Each structure stands twice: as structure tokens, then as C-alpha cells.
Amino acid sequence: MMALASPSEIAPPPPPVPITSTGTGIANLPNQRHKIVAKNGANFTLMVCGESGVGKTTFVNTLFTSTIKEPKNLSKRRLRQPPPKTSQIQITRAELEEKMFKVKLTVIDTPGFGDYVNNRHSWIPIIDFIDDQHEKYMRQEQQPCRKGAVDMRVHACLYFIKPTGHTLTPLDIEVMKKLGSRVNLIPVIAKADTLTPSCLAKFKQNIRDVVTAQNIQLYSCPIESDDDSTTKRNVNIMTASPFAVIGSTQDVLTADGRKVKGREYSWGVAEVENDEHCDFRKLRSLLIRTHMLDLITTTEENHYENYRQAQMETRKFGSPRSQPSENAKFKEEEEVLRKRFTEQVKGEEARFRAWEQQLLSERDRLHKELESQSDKIKDIQSEIDNYYYSNQRDSPRTIRK
Ligand SMILES: Nc1nc2c(ncn2[C@@H]2O[C@H](COP(=O)(O)OP(=O)(O)OP(=O)(O)O)[C@@H](O)[C@H]2O)c(=O)[nH]1
Ligand SMILES: [Mg+2]
């Protein structure tokens, strides 16, 4: 059951931390890598997905308003009201710059799934989109001139989990498995302000257990570092996963007079950028400060490479390659057909076995019948024999013979 956190369960907030467009800390990237990437600037693409109405668009807007002054496509008016339902994939771009280091940030907001009659296929366009970007990049790479190549491969995908307080749903498990094998998947608990701290801690543990049991592949960042404080910070960030977030673009006034982004309740304010209230700051830090480069590198070296290799294998053996947009759909249909076929075969096998069993018991019955009939015949035969024997003994004719 969802329960509002009571004021007694929310710890007093730490002092406010100002976030500005130059406060993203990208220049803290390890020096050599920083130099390499800084030459051209980096492209970083983030995707959000999850069930309908879980707070994805609000989160994207919160991330932008707390990080960048004026993101493209994001008017002030749009930020004042709750976002309308997202009906198609929506792309917002912004540029982050710090100490001459540029990052072109692209955020992909996706329509929520789970509210259709047919849930099974409503997330397929998201998987298609991810595969499509790998495919487009691979084709561009094969061209003689690769200048101006467009790269929208997804470097991190935030999967929003409904704050039910229970565990992952079968739909979550199914979609997370598909995503985890394609992108750096980061689980996020939406609307953390609707759960009490103890309920949230239990929920996080339940999710971790299911992720392990179901073998769901999540992004795991390198934790060890030469510098102890960095290692400590990395441990601190990763132990927070799944990241609980509160989304809000509204400025509200706290009891102690601070103006913060948050959600107002009769008992107080749930603050977006308060580590005691949620993990928003940890998640933002992982994405655009501490692990952005690792997310980009692992996408290139693991996920893109897996896709490229799989495609090359398919082509090598000469089977006609389908478009990635068809792949997921095709695979899905193939899976359904395979399941149906297996079920039919199983059904037929069971029917055959029952029939075989029936025949065997009929055979046994007939054997027994045959045995009893032959016993009867034997009895009759011996009766006849006895009869003849006694008759022959008593007959004078027989004696004469
Ligand atoms: N309590 C609470 N409500 C939230 C939070 N984030 C968003 N909401 C509310 O949840 C509702 C849905 O938010 P959206 O951001 O549109 O959700 P969405 O996942 O983008 O929805 P779709 O586009 O339909 O998939 C809105 O009324 C938001 O104000 C949160 O952190 N806490
Ligand atoms: Mg939306």
C-alpha cells in the first residue's frame, strides 16, 4: 500500500546546495580522458521509460531545470503545469559547458506503457528505438565518409518503477530484461514522496532481490579508484540503487524559509534535492558528473559491440537481415508462435500418451479375458474328456472292442 511519509519520519534537510549551469562538474573527469573527449565535446544520450503516469516527463523537466538554465524545447509555461500524457517519443537537447568542456545532452522521453489492453507490445517501440540507433550508427560507420555522422545511441536508460512498496511486476521484469541486454539500465523508484522511509528501504531490497533472482542486467559502474574519497563516493552512489526520486519543477517554501524544488504537503515539503528525502542528487551526479564517460564507453564497447557482432554474424551466414524496427516485433511474434507450437505439441503428446495408456489397459483386459476364456475352454475340455472317459468305461461296446 502506498503511504505518505509522515513528518516524524523525514529527517531535517541539509543546507541547500545551489545548482547552476556551470556546476555540473564535467571537468572533474579523469584528466587524460577529459582531454580526449574535450577535443570534440561529448554526446550523451539519456532515455527514460516505464509505466504510464509514473513521473518520467516530470523527472526530465526537473533534471533540466535543476541543471541547465534554458533547455531547448522547454518553455517556462510548460514547466508550471503538470505535463500532459506523453504520446510519442520526445527528444529534448541541451548543451552543458564547464571549463571549455562541452557536453551535448539529449534526453529521450518515451510514452508510458501498461495502460493499454494489450500490454505485451506497448514497450516494443522503445526497444526498436534503441536498436534503430545502433543500426543507424553502424551503417554510418560503414560509409567512406563518416564526417557529420549522427549518433543517438542511448548511453543510459532510466527505468521508472511504480512506488507500490511491494516488488517488481512481471511487466517490469520482462521489459527490464530486454532493456538490460541492450543499454546501460538504471532502475529508478518514482514518486519517492509517496513512500515512508522504512517502506522505501524494504521496497529497494525487494527490487534488488528480484533483479538478482531474475538475472536482470543492470548498469554497474566501476567503484574502485586510486583516490579513497572517490571510491567512497562511488560506493555511496551505487548502494543507493534503485534510485528513489521525487520530481517537481515547482518552487516551494520550506518551514525554515528556503525556496526549493519540491512537493508541498500539509505536513511539510518533500524536497527534490535533499539526500534525506530522495536520491535525485546521487542519480544526477552519476549521470552528468561522475560516470558519464563510463556510460559512454560501456555503450560503445559492450552494447554497441554486441549489436554489431550479432548483425555481422547474421549477415555472414547469409540469412536476410531484417530491419531492427522489425527485429523486436519479429522476435516477439516468433516467441509467441514458438510457445503456441510447443503447447500444441505438448497437448498432442499428452493426448497420445492417454490413448496409448488406454490401448495398453485394453490389451491387458483382453489378455485376461483370453486367459479366462482359455481356462474355461480347458475346464470344458476336461469335462468332456471326463464324460467320454466315464461313458467308454461303462459301455459294453467299448469293452468288446
Ligand atoms: N507525488 C508525486 N507525484 C509526481 C511525481 N512526479 C510526477 N508526479 C505526478 O504524476 C503525474 C504524472 O506525471 P508525468 O510526469 O506526466 O508522468 P509520465 O510517466 O511522463 O506519464 P506518461 O507520459 O503518461 O507515461 C503528474 O500529475 C505529476 O505531477 C513525484 O515525484 N511525486
Ligand atoms: Mg510523460
Image (cartoon, rainbow, N blue to C red):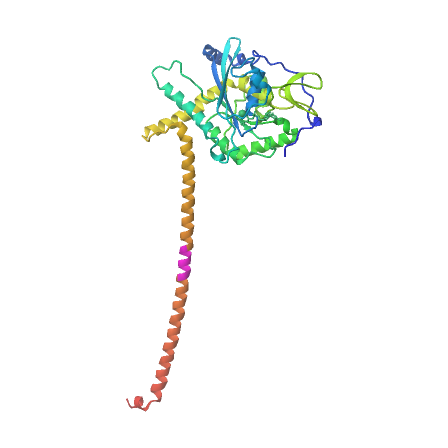
Q: Main secondary structure of the magenta part?
A: helix
Q: In the rendered image of this protein, does residue 91 appear above or below residue 401?
A: above
The furthest residue to the left: 401
Q: In the rendered image of this protein, does residue 389 appear above or below residue 8?
A: below
The residue segment tinted magenta is: 355-362
Q: Is residue 282 visible?
A: yes
Image quadrant containing the N terminus: top right
User: Where residue 12 appears, x then y in whole percent?
Assistant: 69, 21
User: Where residue 224 appears, x then y in whole percent?
Assistant: 54, 21
Q: Is residue 228 visible?
A: no
Image quadrant containing the C terminus: bottom left
| Residue 333 on the magenta span | no
**Occupied quadrant, residue 138:** top left
The furthest residue to the top: 100
| Residue 361 on the magenta span | yes
Judged from the image, the quadrant occupied by ligand 2 is top right
User: Where residue 121 appears, x then y in whole percent?
Assistant: 46, 33
Q: In the rendered image of this protein, does residue 359 appear above or below residue 208?
A: below
In the image, is 70 to the left or to the right of 14? left
**Occupied quadrant, residue 130:** top left
